[in-house]
């Protein structure tokens, strides 16, 4: 099982790390965590739920990315995760 890393640590972007785990966990580091941490978590949980993806660890290192950027980075990470770990 491989770890997938997508994105960057540039301003207005985020780095998403996705790896297999025993249960779903989400870690968020953000320059705007106090204001938007709950929103970032909601976006991540919504995308994971839409893909019915459980038993993964998601780490989001956010540098002020908007919702659609976080969602796009996570969608790409999930696609790569499925290709690498499940042969999809």
Image: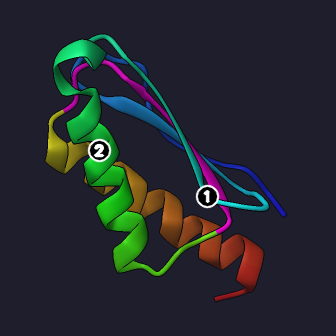
For the residues labelled 2 and 1, the Cα–Cα distance comes to: 18 Å
* Viewer-closest of 16 and 58: 58
Which percent across, then down, holds residue 38?
26, 35
Q: Earlier in the sequence, mark 2 or mark 1?
A: 1
Residue 8's place in the image compared with 45, above or below, is above
Around disc 1, counting alpha carbons within 10 Å, would you say few (fewer than 14), some (14 to 19), or many (20 or more)?
A: some
Q: Secondary structure at mark 2?
A: helix
Around disc 2, counting alpha carbons within 10 Å, would you say few (fewer than 14), some (14 to 19), or many (20 or more)?
A: many
Q: Residue furthest bottom?
A: 88
Residue 43's place in the image compared with 20, above or below, is above
Residue drawn at point x = 26 percent, y = 52 percent? 43
Colouring convention used in this rendered image of the protein: rainbow
Which percent across, then down, holds residue 87?
73, 86
Please identify the dominant SS of the magenta region: strand
Give residue 22's quadrant in the image: bottom right
Image quadrant holding the C terminus, namely bottom right
Image quadrant holding the N terminus, namely bottom right
Residue 55's place in the image compared with 9, above or below, is below
Residue drawn at point x = 16 percent, y = 18 percent? 35
Give residue 50's quadrant in the image: bottom left
Residue drawn at point x = 39 percent, y = 73 percent? 49
Residue drawn at point x = 51 percent, y = 66 percent? 78
Task: Kindly identify which residue carries mark 2.
Answer: 70
Task: Kindly identify which residue carries mark 1.
Answer: 24
Residue 50's place in the image compared with 36, above or below, is below
Q: Which region is colored magenta?
A: 55-65
Q: Is residue 33 left or right of residue 22?
A: left
């Amino acid at each position: 099982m491989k770890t997938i890393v997508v994105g960057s640590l540039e301003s207005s972007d985020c780095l998403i790390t996705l790896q297999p785990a025993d249960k779903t966990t989400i870690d968020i580091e953000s320059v705007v965590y106090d204001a938007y941490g709950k929103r970032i978590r909601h976006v991540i949980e919504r995308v994971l739920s839409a893909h019915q993806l459980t038993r993964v660890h998601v780490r989001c290192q956010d540098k002020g990315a908007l919702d659609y950027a976080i969602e796009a980075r996570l969608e790409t990470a999930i696609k790569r995760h499925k290709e690498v770990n499940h042969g999809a």
